[in-house]
Image: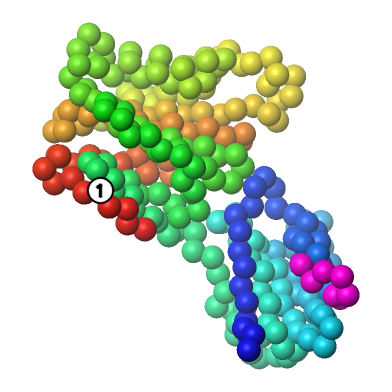
Amino acid sequence: MHPALELRWEPITGSFSMKKHMKRVRQSYGHGGKVSFYTPPTNKDGSNATIVFFQWEKEKARGEGGILFDSESNSALVFQCNAPFGMDNTLAKEIFDVLHLQHTAKRRWRIYDIQAELPDWLKLDSYKFAPGLFKLNFSGPSRLKIHLFRMGPASIILEKVSLADWASPYFSKLHPQHGIQLTANENGVVVLDLEGKTPLAERIVPWRRTYGLFLAKHEQTTNRILALAASARRPLDIQPLKDIFARYVTFPQKTASSDHQS
């Protein structure tokens, strides 16, 4: 009356540590449980092992399993079989051969007149829908924060300023202690990043530095400004952010949908 096979997985915040996940597995069996790992937590070159097998016992039950780390999705997966079968068993090898984490999966969001496709490992933290401003706040590994904005009517906001002149002070409000640098203004998309002035705390402790990116465009057909702001404690991978922004679009109100598809 119990599952024969159990899978658990979670995104990794910060750097991956196999030892930390080995400790979590041990703790999960509680008092009286016994866990023995087959392989050491590091490779021969001293780097973290990407997979470690273990054997477990709890009261009269026993079985085997493993911890698998997928560097592309920055996630860890724990595999447990509630029966002993031997890790050299053909069945065990077949199971691990097909285990993988989907690091290209997308989740589509379509709310009112906006639509975006984001990696499914991004979590929606909060949102705001008010006249003239929609805002969705997402978070990911390594303290990654992504914000999607929809503002309008654009003709009023940009009546006396260009999109680039509007974007710089708007981004500065999100990171008031930093300097803002215009990186590009091509194909109707303004690209800004954090440059120049750096807060004293980040100069003293460099690994706490904040990296930020702001993308903005004016959608003429719907008279809206769309923007994406991203920040993290490590250098941002810009191309995936640009890909997200390229698929962030608005629809005329008469065809708008207020459903969330995932």
- Residue 223 visible somewhere in the drawing: yes
Q: Is residue 34 left or right of residue 135?
A: right
Query: Is residue 238 placed above or below 70 in the rendered structure?
Result: above
Residue 244 is situated, as x and y percent measured from the top left of the image, at 37, 44
- Residue visible at 13% across and 33% down in the picture: 221
On-image quarter of the N terminus: bottom right
- Stretch in magenta: 28-34
Q: Is residue 188 above or below residue 122?
A: above
Residue 166 x/y as whole percent: 33, 15
Mark 1: secondary structure: loop
Side (left or right) of 202 relative to 247: right
Quarter holding residue 219:
top left
Residue 247 seen by the camera:
no
31 drawn magenta: yes
Q: Which residue is mark 1?
A: 258
Q: Nearer the viewer, residue 109 or 126?
A: 126
- Name the foreground residue: 148 vs 134: 134
In the picture shown, does residue 260 fall above or below 24?
above
Tell me: residue 125, above or below residue 74: above
Question: Could you tell me residue 37's position as x and y percent?
Answer: 83, 73
Q: Examine the structure image and report whether residue 188 is included in the region drawn in magenta.
A: no
Residue 30 picture quarter: bottom right
- Residue at 46% x, 29% y is 213
Q: Quadrant of the C terminus?
A: bottom left
Asked whether, in this view, residue 53 is left or right of residue 116, the answer is: right
Q: Residue furthest left?
A: 254
